[in-house]
Image: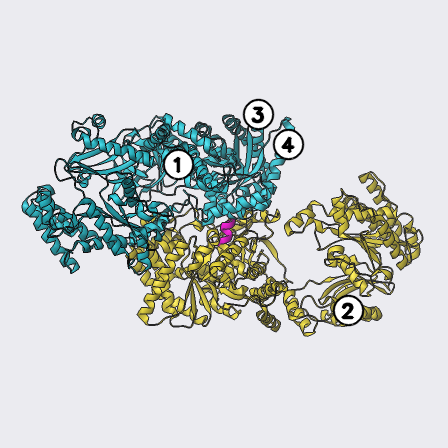
Chain colours: A cyan, B yellow
Amino acid sequence: MTTQWVYSFGAKESNARPDTQGPVKNLLGGKGANLAEMASLGLPVPPGFTITTEVCTAFYKNAEQYPAELRAQVDAALKKIENAVGVKFGDAKNPLLLSVRSGARVSMPGMMDTVLNLGLNDETVVGLATSSGDERFAWDSYRRFVQMYGDVVLGVSHHDFEDILDQQKRDDNVFNDTDLSADAWKNVVAEYKALVKRDTGADFPMNPVDQLWGAVGAVFKSWMTARAVSYRAIHDIPEDWGTAVNVQAMVFGNMGDDCATGVAFTRDPSTGENYFYGEYLINAQGEDVVAGIRTPQSLTILGREKEGSNLPSMEETMPGVFKQLDDVRQTLEKHYRDMQDIEFTVQSGTLYMLQTRTGKRTSAAALKIAVDMVGEGLITKEEALLRLEPQALDQLLHPTLDPAAHKTILTRGLPASPGAASGIVVFSADDAEAMAKDGKKVILCRRETSPEDIHGMHAAAGILTTRGGMTSHAAVVARGMGRACVAGAGALQIDYETATMRVGDRVVKAGDVITIDGGAGEVMLGAVPTVQPELSGDFATVMQWADDVRRMGVRANAETPLDAKTARGFGAEGIGLCRTEHMFFDPTRIQHVREMIFANNAPARRDALAKLLPAQRGDFAELFEIMRGLPVTIRLLDPPLHEFLPQSDADIAEFARIANIGADQVRMRLRELHETNPMLGHRGCRLGMTYPEIYEMQARAIFEAAIKVDVTPEIMIPLIATHRELAVLKKLVDETAVAVFAETGKTVSYTVGTMIELPRAALTADEIAPDAAFFSFGTNDLTQTTLGLSRDDSALFMNDYLRQGVFARDPFATLDIDGVGQLVRIAVEKGRKVRPDIKLGICGEHGGDPASIAFCESVGLHYVSCSPYRVPIARLAAAQATIRENAGKKPDAVKRAA
Amino acid sequence: MTTQWVYSFGAKESNARPDTQGPVKNLLGGKGANLAEMASLGLPVPPGFTITTEVCTAFYKNAEQYPAELRAQVDAALKKIENAVGVKFGDAKNPLLLSVRSGARVSMPGMMDTVLNLGLNDETVVGLATSSGDERFAWDSYRRFVQMYGDVVLGVSHHDFEDILDQQKRDDNVFNDTDLSADAWKNVVAEYKALVKRDTGADFPMNPVDQLWGAVGAVFKSWMTARAVSYRAIHDIPEDWGTAVNVQAMVFGNMGDDCATGVAFTRDPSTGENYFYGEYLINAQGEDVVAGIRTPQSLTILGREKEGSNLPSMEETMPGVFKQLDDVRQTLEKHYRDMQDIEFTVQSGTLYMLQTRTGKRTSAAALKIAVDMVGEGLITKEEALLRLEPQALDQLLHPTLDPAAHKTILTRGLPASPGAASGIVVFSADDAEAMAKDGKKVILCRRETSPEDIHGMHAAAGILTTRGGMTSHAAVVARGMGRACVAGAGALQIDYETATMRVGDRVVKAGDVITIDGGAGEVMLGAVPTVQPELSGDFATVMQWADDVRRMGVRANAETPLDAKTARGFGAEGIGLCRTEHMFFDPTRIQHVREMIFANNAPARRDALAKLLPAQRGDFAELFEIMRGLPVTIRLLDPPLHEFLPQSDADIAEFARIANIGADQVRMRLRELHETNPMLGHRGCRLGMTYPEIYEMQARAIFEAAIKVDVTPEIMIPLIATHRELAVLKKLVDETAVAVFAETGKTVSYTVGTMIELPRAALTADEIAPDAAFFSFGTNDLTQTTLGLSRDDSALFMNDYLRQGVFARDPFATLDIDGVGQLVRIAVEKGRKVRPDIKLGICGEHGGDPASIAFCESVGLHYVSCSPYRVPIARLAAAQATIRENAGKKPDAVKRAA
């Protein structure tokens, strides 16, 4: 059987859908499939045909030769167009003109886009002038064709064509292209052709069939341009997908006042409101709508009124055609069951549909459309959930820049924590706090932040750093607090001494006002107005649907009462990670922490810890109260002790004075505790192993607080590498529980488990699980160790790595499934093997990332835990993951747990 | 069938070997097995019996109850002793006395050792006085028994017994125990018994059978003392091994001048010389030989003459018994086929053998004994190889402390690089170099070392650091250079400003002389004499045998000509790791390296690199010449660039002057390049990805050098985490090769491969292997990342971790097989699956560690690579690994490759 390489559409006799195994899109490409789809719905599509993606694949498999049957099939398909339109390709009197467009499964930069007006030559242009009755139109069309074809097919520089055009306008002393006469265009065409001859050594092809094959070949060759190849490498698009080529009869919206062209959305893409939203221009081409020379007019009376425009709508000027178009809108929405972005042209009173595709929309619109469509019975709740982009919900939770506002961008960094904020530039946490107390909004600008800056970060409206990545301290804390943050703005140089920062020769001083957009990673000069979002009723509706569907629980990473309240407000079902060290930095406590560090022996350490105990107990009591009835996972002390020591000369002197020791002694201890690679140093459970009294105090504080509130503390031991560490420390916690229960005569149920955040822990999970009631995957550190990549230092080369396709996405933002994910999978399997009921969760930053959440669902984790502002995102993403996972599984195979 | 819980020995009718599945030692313990073995050889062993290790296990499984049949079996065995000796246990006239000893499979601290003279009481002591004709002897024996039993069985403090004895001597005004009379001993016994009554609330047991069961119970209970439990945890000894109990008839060497006692080695344990080496004392007990009150005499005339002693030898005083003993020596060596350490007693002219076990020996002796025994036909070459401790060869390659010398130990650190060295204390690399130029021997003392200290380390005789572990920079470089090194001496505080270091109140200044022993980790005040070793002919013989046997190749980690020559001299079969960065630190080159780092763009970087090219090419040419005919694996630049920048103010100023830029600019670049965790930072192939011109220059230098020498360069890309990195960089290397070959018209064969040193690389080895001709396991970094443990920072808590049994051995010294080994195994399997011929090696420090080498054999690596001074160790260890592996495999299953 001969392979069918060419599929016709729009010519009445040939609207059959191809008989293919995969989606039609795989064979015809996105554009071709939609054209065929519209044609099969009986919509007025200019007739055409699609050369399939399989031709592209065959072309490259066969040393850039087309399949033998292709030419005959194209000839036949062309014949069908001629028959449908009633004019002939290359006809000197009334020529058929074609458009040629590429069309892969997904739109892809680096691919040839479009050649219009193909079929014109020195002969047919005269025919077009006659048949259209407009010589200027015909020659303008011809010169456009020569320019497009010369550029994209023959590789002649676009600029050289523009130079010729500019010279013509200079000669004729006109400003707009539209002011050039037919003769001027004739002259331009002649010079264009001379340019092509000069540049390529060959005449511009006059034979329409040669033109067609030239354009088809250019599309296929553009599949292998460097840009397309590297785009595919980065986006994991297989080379053998190939591209299709769409050849279609030209229609013209610029042949008179019964002609028009326009673009439209089937609903308002900004608000989601269900009315026909679009623009049109009478006697114009598609590119005129975009170019902005003439003001496009609204399609509908309602649209015109909303915009306060007095230009007549299409509903008024062309009521018949409009009615037809509005019917098309209904048909398309019913068929595609989603909001569509369409292009159309009216030629001499006849409507033609040139394109339809799923319309892009704002987050608010996406939400409203999804909810409305469920209400209208168009889609199911599950479909509605899958339609929404979880990340986009962020826009709904934070202030955003007023899209209408003017902005002067100073520099860019990583979009580390969403939201926009304006404020006065300060360079220290203390300044931030002091100015905030005076009621001023500030942006805290630091090379990087450390736990000592927490109070300043809290006081600031936004945080800007010049170093560090998406999971740097600044980024993580800012997301946790819901502060806007731009991190790792590497071009910016901060000089603390002169209290200035600069990009090139632009200098910003302390006291100046800047604006940062943590969703876009932009830093702007001055105050750019922002708009406050509102959580609409649709938002609550969608969250409820998500909760009804999802299998995994969603918890929050939170330790402050504010964070915990925020998290519960956003629907968190518990705390998955309470980092106890943040509690140690409180100014009233840090002195005791430091005393503990300076203690020479265990009894002295115990004395210092005894002073911290009431405060820790109070922290936990408050947190448990807020999370009453829910599980709270508390991680025992994790960071290396040197993080708690004073660093600046002034702080050292002050501490030495209070502690009544020499500043030299403080410096010596600092030196002793200094680490080359603190990430891999004396931290996590290693502290508990060498200073068991610290963990003992923390466990005591937890139990003493928990016996007063209905809560299930889950005590988490960090940085376990070996089963013996967990065995030793679990015993310590259990013994402390026994002691507290004996003293108080009360008990609480609690569990002890561990972070899995080192490769060794994952690999030996079967040895660790017997002592662990739960595993919580600490994927931040697991990513750092598995990839040997410091999240604080990777910003310097991460862009290089993303650009070169080493990582498709920043592995600190989206879980590296092939590497880190493999360890998670190993740990899950080994852990479950020896302890089938082990509770499994994730508490790294990935717990709030939709792609990572899908992975968590696939390995069957019980919950994800993320920063409070990501809880809604995680709820939706978890729901999507369940729906997608169930699509490949029997329902109820896995049960929900929190 | 009734279990046999008790095995008799020495009583003629009962010398049958137990019929057991495992080695006899598992059932009877080490001591019991050897006693039974000697008895079965017909040697004169005092009769006795062993209660098996299974009783111990049963005891703990059954709530500390003995098996029901035990008592009857013990009674029967006791009867056999009585019959053999002809006296009865508890007989008032002529009592049988017993010794009771523990005996696990391996000797273990914390276990009950020995109770002697058991069976004495107020009645039998009188009988013993009569039967021995020596009342003083009888009462001395009795008081010894009460003291030993009171201490180890009843838990009465040893000191309280000593106090009573001291008081008695004070009362009688005598200095030595031996001067106390029979009556004095009677008095002591009375007071001892009163003490026991006071302390335990019960009378000292008078019934010999009660005494026996008390002692047996004490042995079993000592299996569970805290010290024994923690020793087992640390040494991975299973609890269910249990201990045996040995009960044996007492014999006395102190009943007159026809009595004697002694200890001996069947060969000289210091030199290995084949003569009977030992000491004896007439009319003495075993403990008298050890106590040193009387001077022990040599067994043989030869020994007496060697020692220049005029005390008569046993060969002269007791020729008959000596002849018998010398026969025993021959019998034991033939039977055990190894040098034995024996204990014997002569009672009234009759020889009794009390113990035999494999004798400890020096490395030199071990070597000589092994070679001699092969010559004597006692053992095979394979057995000889297995007898040798590879690590111990180190002693033969480096100077050692004169064992006779007095030493004042200042402090201890890690034994980081073997050898002993004395020298003048200096605190900077520059000082070390300057003084060495003046012909002085120096010890370089640093908190830690960095690549900038290399010249000073080279100039020093030894290196001492206060921070860092077994694989810290100092340790690795020192081992590579063969310099003595004590690392991580944490108690030592170095103050560079005052040029002093101190431990407590002991201060050492620059200019003082110290001695370090890098094999023992000791730091001593002053100059302690050292002795130079010689590599004897036996050494070469053993190395040849090892080479004949081993499957794996042995290469060296070396980059300097000196190291490479040393390595080849030690038998290295190529270079497994040439670290190119060391070549960058040369003072004549570092300036160009820094220029390269300060270059603002690729062309400027290329200019600076062009200046480095001739030097790099020269390095490689020299190295290839030394390694002619052998493979050389070259790792492209690995460390982060900031390591090359000046750090001190003076160096910064100097560099700024030469480079004609501001010191501020230098500091700014330093800040930009600063990393929080440099181990996980912008290094390894990440440099090649962002600055491809660096790797291009290095590849060019390699190819330009290689085309002139017969060598196979293996170009190794470090720190690969993803397959894409290797693909990109392999392409770069291949393109450079094509260019050099085209320019020169010559080609060389070369391969490109990668370090596997990140967990992700191991986990995705199947993706990486298609572009890698070889994998070299960089287990230093793989250990750091898998365990999340910085080798530079782990010293602070590693001792805690070893003590608590978290690690059996420092994972930077011996590969963590459960964790890191699992990743190696995964990588080997995945790599081989897609590329069966992939060459596999290891180049981390573990490549020179015998236990790790055994693991490498088990996963089938092709070679190990280690520092030059470890090459002989690796050759032996690899041979042992092959022999052991083949014991469990068909021969020739795997072939040797280099």
Corner quadrant of residue B309: bottom right
Task: Give the Cα separation between the discs numbered 4 and 2.
Answer: 62 Å
Contact? badges 3 and 1 (CB < 8 Å)? no
Q: Main secondary structure of the magenta part?
A: helix
Q: Which residue is mark 1?
A: A386
Which one is nearer the viewer's eye here, B741 or A549? A549
Q: Name the element at disc 4.
A: helix
3 or 1: mark nearer the eye: 1
Chain at numbered mark 1: A
Q: Is disc 3 on the same chain as disc 2?
A: no
Q: Name the element at disc 2.
A: helix
Residue A678 visible? The answer is no
Q: Position of residue B525 (x, y in %)?
A: 57, 56
Which residues, given as a range, are shown in magenta?
B781-789
Q: Which residue is mark 3?
A: A708
Q: Name the element at disc 1.
A: helix
Q: Earlier in the sequence, mark 3 or mark 1?
A: 1
